[in-house]
Amino acid sequence: MLMSKKTRGITLSAVFSALCVIFLFIASVWPTGQLGLVALSSLFVAAAVIESGVVSGLYVFIISSGLGLLILPNKTAPLLFLIFFGYYPIIKCLIERINQTVIQWILKLIVFNASVTILWLFINELFLAFGDNPPEVWVIYLAGSAVFLLYDYGYTKLIWFYKERISRGRGTRE
C-alpha cells in the first residue's frame, strides 16, 4: 500500500525527530564529542528537507528542539541545536536556491555570525572561560567564520552523500 505524500512527510518527520533527539541525548551525556554530535544531529533535519521539503525539516527542528529542551538532562546540546545547528540545514537549502555563489556565502556568514552574536549575548559563560584576558571579539568572529566555512563545505559533502547513496533521488528537496 502506498502512503500519501503528506503521510510520508509526517512519518519521516517523526522518525527523523526521534533520531535527532537520540543524538542530542548522546551529546548531552557524552561531553567529549558534544559539538560534533550536535552537528551530526542536524543531518536529520537536512534529510527531512531532502525527503519531504522545507516544511518537514522545520517540523523536525521544532520537535527536536522542544523535546531536547524538555527531556534532556544537560541543556547545552539542545541549546546549540536551537541557536544554530538545528535550523541551519533549512536556511542552507533556502540560501542555495540563489544562483550567485558570492551572495550565498555572504548570507551564510551573516547567519553564522548572527548565531555567534546570540551566543555572545545570551550564553556568555562560554566566553568567560578565558578569564581576565578574553580574546578580541574580532578574533572570535574571524576564527569562527573560518571554521564555519570548513563546516559548510563538509556539510555540503555529507548532504551530497546522503542524496546520492541513501536517498538516491527519491526525495523532493523544496
Image (spheres, grey):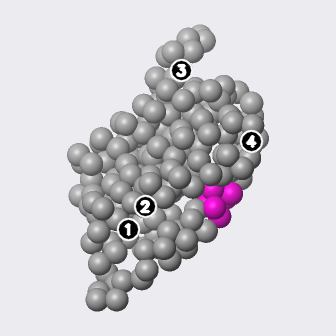
Q: Distance between the residues labelled 2 and 1?
A: 23 Å
Q: Which amino acid does label 4 sit on?
A: Gln
| Comes first in the chain, label 4 or label 1 | 1
Q: What residue type is labelled 2?
A: Val
Q: In what quadrant of the picture does the C terminus appear?
A: top right
Secondary element at tag 1? loop
Residues at marks 4 and 3 touching, judged by CB atoms closer than 8 Å: no
Secondary element at tag 3? helix
| Comes first in the chain, label 2 or label 4 | 4
For the stretch drawn in magenta, the main secondary structure is helix
Residue drawn at (62%, 39%), measured in percent from left and top? 95
Q: Nearer the viewer, mark 2 or mark 3?
A: 2
| Comes first in the chain, label 2 or label 3 | 3
- Span colored in magenta: 149-155
Q: How far apart are marks 4 and 3 (CA)?
A: 33 Å
Tag 4: Cα neighbours inside 10 Å, few (<14), some, or many (≥20)? few
Q: What residue type is labelled 1?
A: Trp
Residue 30, position as x, y percentages in the image: 38, 68
Q: Name the residue under label 2.
A: 116
Q: Name the residue under label 4.
A: 100
Tag 3: Cα neighbours inside 10 Å, few (<14), some, or many (≥20)? some
Above-or-below relation of 144 to 59 = below
Q: Mark 1 points at which residue?
A: 30
Residue 23, position as x, y percentages in the image: 43, 53
Question: For residue 8, which numbered disc appears in the image?
Answer: 3
Q: Is residue 48 left or right of residue 154?
A: left
